[in-house]
Amino acid sequence: MRSLLFNNLRAHARRYVATGVAIAISVAFVLAALSFGVAIKDSLSQGVRDTYEGSSVVIDVSGGDITDQQLAAASDTVRGVDGVNAVIVQRVTYLELSHNGKRLGASVKSGNPAPLHQPKLSEGTMPSDSGTIAIPTSTADALGLKVGDKVHVATAMSSESMEMDLTVSGLVDAGGLLSNAAAVTNDQTALEGGYVSKVFVIANQGVDASELTTRIAAKLDNTSYSVQTSEAATQADLDRINMDSATTTAMIMVFPAIAIVVALIVVSTTFQVTVEQRRRELALLRCVGATGKQVKRLLLQETLLVGLVGSAIGLALGCVFVGLGLWASGISDTFVEALGTVRPLTALLVLVFGTLLTVLAGRKPAKGVTRIPPLAALQAEDGQPGAKSRRRYGFTIIATLLTVAGLGAAWYGISMVHSGEDANLELGFLCALGGMMFGLVGTVMVASLLLPTIVRILGAPLRGVVGSLAAQNSVRNKSRTAATGTSVVIGITLVVLMLVGAVSLRTTLTTQIDSSFPVDLTVSRTAVSDDSYLTADQIDAISKIDGVAATVPVAQSAGTVTSADVPSAQTVVVDDVDLSSVAHNPISQVPEGSVFVSEGDVAGSTATVCIASTCKDLSVKVSDRAEAGTVLVNPADFVALGGNTQDVSSLVVKLTDDADVESVVTSINGVSDSLNAQGAAQERQMYENAINVALMVVVALLGVAVLVALVGVSNTLSLSVVERTRENGLLRAMGLTRRNMVTMLGVESVLVSLAAALTGTGLGILFGWIALESLPLNVSSMVLVIPWMQLAGVIALAIVAALLASIIPGRKAGRVSPVQALAHE
């Protein structure tokens, strides 16, 4: 049997190629997903260990409201504890770094003296005095800085704004996934107003950390301080990392799981057709004395070897993908180091998994052969192996129940989310998510039953010999058409779901932002600026910046508001200009004769508004447009009060649709160091970038499942060519050319893929809407957007891929001469 096994593998090698490819892709995907999860966990874990490296005891002060004086007193107390060598207070703040007109925010912390962890420097040294700073290499690249350059530092976190110039002493490399903060000396003024991250205690040599922790805790005797050994703090953070990384890995593994399901369908279909095509061969083995168990064992051994070879190839590909991916992303410094994240046990388990997956897919077809009597199998075939199918009432009932129950649960969960009760948000989301998953499985099962009918409808308009033959051949084997199309449906459904969900979510969030903050950017003077107003030259320069569509200046004058019903803090008068040319949503302007205030009991009240010596009584209205300490008046009233429209306090900016917000903000800040541009455009682009990146990654991952499905299309066509050899030879003998043969198979593949793509697109839109409505977001309304152009691109891509998948089978069918084909058994 062993020689027969290897002879069979050689004889039917071409039939098993697509099976091996599907298994290899799935195994590589699983290995890459698991290894990336391990790499993320290792990188974060190393960051945790680096945080506590060199310390014996760590004091956490984040749980209490502790003043600097209390912290200083506590530090002195800890220094006096027997066994303490040093106490290091690590502070963290947020600074704005600027250089050559470019600005960038950065976290800044006090540098760690030895023996605490020392960041890795690409060049230069750590700060040695209060006039130096070490910054991350990514920050230096963004600002165009190098060692020895001056960087302007500003912060508003302290009670008094601060600005200074510091010299870059070194560039800090980011370690793995963790971005290193900029570092300054502990006595740096820039740290004032920040918060205390950790208090590290270094023990004398030979002092037990646990005993020292107990002594320190007894001395402090304050519930605001959390004292524990550095080892315990490290383990606590590692436990949290392990839990988070387990969740991350589980989320990542969703995509390989989808690819595996598709691969199972492809592999099972391949084996089923292959076994059917070998009925006469297998029956002959039964006639010469082989038992049913021996034939079944022979087929399972074939699937075992195919699975083993395919899994081994996938393992090698997965290792290459992991090495290149981790190296390119910067998680690992070298390709060899990245390969170290592939654990030998993980690789072995993935290899075994891929092999067993193949055996599982081939077990049912192999078992079915043993039920066929040898004499029945030797009878002439009807040319449509496997075409006879029984009506699967049980399958239909299960599919219907899953669909109805899943969609019902999703609808109920959505109603809970939109009930307005906060307590129902999380439960409603989970209910809708669970219902959507069951509904998705049910609708895909229903789609598999309907696919042959959809293919027949799409092929009905085709005319001519080639078109008619292709339409009929595409549905001759309904079970194979359904299985092949279902794998494509799954991939297309998930891709479209993500496209519709992401585009709709992006539109919903930007609509909400536009509603709350209808303008893109507001340019004003910084808090430390000597001048309160923008100059005409600055306004002109900003209006000419690439990406700026329109600007509207807003004037401001110091004034007073006298009213018993309006808080006395209203001391600044701002001109309320017409912002319709720069606003995304309509903004109600202050009517002439009225004034907008931020708060107060204004029912029927009147306020006396004065600028210098000119006063006017205005009707008071409360509006969220007015900030505390300011009032808004109509331009006509502003001029009547003596306000100077040339005293421009801020400039409202509208950006073009294709503008890069970061580039525009950098250019505006480059006009003058005293200018600061902020607004909803930054938040809007942040959401867009996050959604676009997530969408790109998810669609790329789902693309693997679609690729496996298309391998199944090619495999099905190849097997169809083999089983229809005599038929194709007859067609060639009757005048069908090679080009006609290639065209016929191309049309067959397009019909199946088009039916699957259209079905998947419809299901994707449905479940994209369900996913959007189930999100517990605090927005006024969800906006469903169907990106028709992108969906058309997905369908077109599926058709093109199907055509490419049909080329090899078509050329193979065309190369066989009519005489050889007619002589084929």
Image: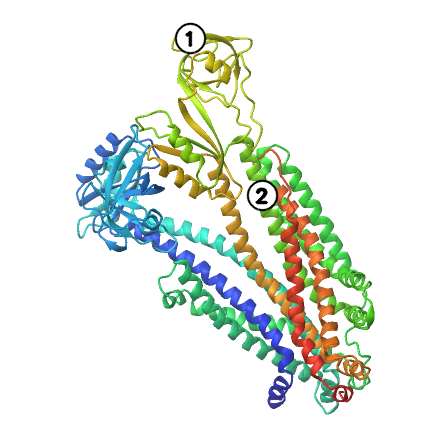
Indicate the position of residue 577 as horizontal and vertical percent values: 50, 23
Amino acid of disc 1: Thr
Residue that badge 2 annotates: 505
* Residue density around tag 2, few if under 14, some if 14–19, many if 20 or more, within 10 Å: many
Q: Quadrant of the C terminus?
A: bottom right
Residue 614's label in the rendered image is: 1
Depth order, front residue of 191/616:
616
| Residue 370 visible, this angle | no
Question: Which residue is pictured at 79% across the width and 69% down the height?
Answer: 467
Instruction: Say what secondary structure mark 1 lies in.
Output: strand
Marks 2 and 1, how far apart in space? Answer: 50 Å
Whole-percent x and y of residue 752?
A: 72, 65
Q: Is residue 183 visible?
A: yes
Q: How many marks?
A: 2
**Quarter holding the N terminus?**
bottom right
Residue 267: which quarter of the image?
bottom right
Mark 1 nearby-residue class (10 Å; few <14, some 14–19, many ≥20): few
Side of 793 relative to 351 (left or right):
right
Is residue 210 or residue 593 the one in the foreground? 593
Q: Is residue 282 left or right of residue 247?
A: right
- Sequence-wise, the earlier of marks 2 and 1 is 2
At a point 39% along the width and 58% down the height, the residue shown is 331
Please tell me whether mark 2 sits on a helix, a strand or a loop. Answer: helix
Q: Position of residue 76 (x, y in %)?
A: 19, 36
**Residue 215: which disc?**
none
Which corner quadrant of the image does residue 567 belong to?
top left
